[in-house]
Amino acid sequence: MAKSLVRSKIYQPSENGTGGGVSSADFDFNGNRPISRATPGIEGVTPGGDDLKTVLENVLYPAVAPIATISIDRPTREIGENPNYTLTWAVTKKTNPIVSILVDGQAITVSGLSQNGTKNGTFSAITGTFSRAMSVTDGGGLSDSENVIVTYLLRMFWGTTEKNGTSQPISDADILALASSELRSNRLKSFTNFGGGSTRLIFAIPTAFGTPQFLTNGLANTAFTKVRTDSDFVNQQAATVKMDVWVSDNIYNSPLDSVQIQ
């Protein structure tokens, strides 16, 4: 049977100074537990302590900080989207009792043990980037903190159209009805097996993304006309953003192997 304790005896001379009589000081040290020190080595560590048991505890089993975790619903959102949010948080007790939890600026009533919860809030705007944070501290002064980021992005659209965009204007409804779209921070994107069916290629690109260059099947293609320039476009969130719309001058009967926006 494995022993759970290691017992050490320290022998000292008797009070009369003779070697015939000795007294012993015993202490118990539990070595049957995983070492908590996470660093690869202990060189340079000053453990502290005035007795062997304390030194061993400090070297092999230092206190471990509590762990904070936090997440948020919809970390990527379209400009104009609902500003309400829900944080889901948790703290994990390690060595010492937990004495403080702060979530999104609000102090949480602590139990001393591991616990979790949610917190609701509202962003001050429906555009831009926002950060929300939490922290946890234990009775030994050890702490951990985490944060989450929410980013509001513009949406880019692409697909095909039978309209030329000039004598047949492209409406907001036409853009919203395109086959594909994506929330993006830039215009750079590649497509394969794109177009065909005796239609034109169409790209609705946020004006903030700049002027694109088009490559079809690896070659520069300038046969595109910007049919809407810095125009007001009402997105699915009822927000007005600036949009440029490009339509190919050519009609493609068969899909192109590759199309790139640079």
Image: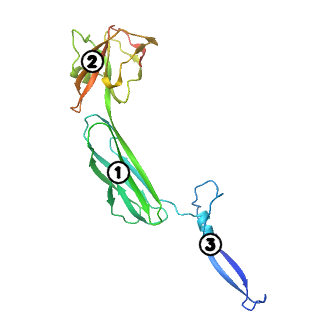
* In the foreground, 168 or 205: 205
Amino acid type assigned to the residue bearing label 3 in the image? Lys
Residue at left 62%, top 72%? 53
Q: Kindly identify which residue carries mark 3.
A: 53
Q: Of marks 1 and 3, which one's residue comes earlier in the chain? A: 3
Residue 194 falls in image quadrant: top left
Disc 3 from disc 2: Cα separation:
76 Å
Secondary element at tag 1: strand
Residue mark closest to the camera, 1 vs 3: 3
Q: Which residue is mark 1?
A: 88
Residue bearing mark 2:
229
* For marks 2 and 1 on the same chain, the one whose residue lies earlier in the sequence: 1
Which secondary structure, mark 3? helix
Label 1 is placed on what type of residue? Answer: Thr
Distance, label 1 to label 3, CA atoms, is 41 Å
Q: Please state if 253 lies on the left or on the right of 233 as rendered.
A: right
Q: Residues within 10 Å of mark 3 (few under 14, many from 20)?
A: some
In the image, residue 81 sits, relative to residue 94, either above or below, namely above
Is 48 left, or right, of 145 in this rendering?
Answer: right
Q: Residue furthest bottom?
A: 16
Image quadrant containing the C terminus: top left
Mark 1: few/some/many CA within 10 Å (<14, 14-19, 20+): some
In the rendered view, would you say 202 is above or below 130? above
Indicate the position of residue 128 as horizontal and vertical percent values: 32, 37
The percent coordinates of residue 98 (x first, y second) are: 42, 64
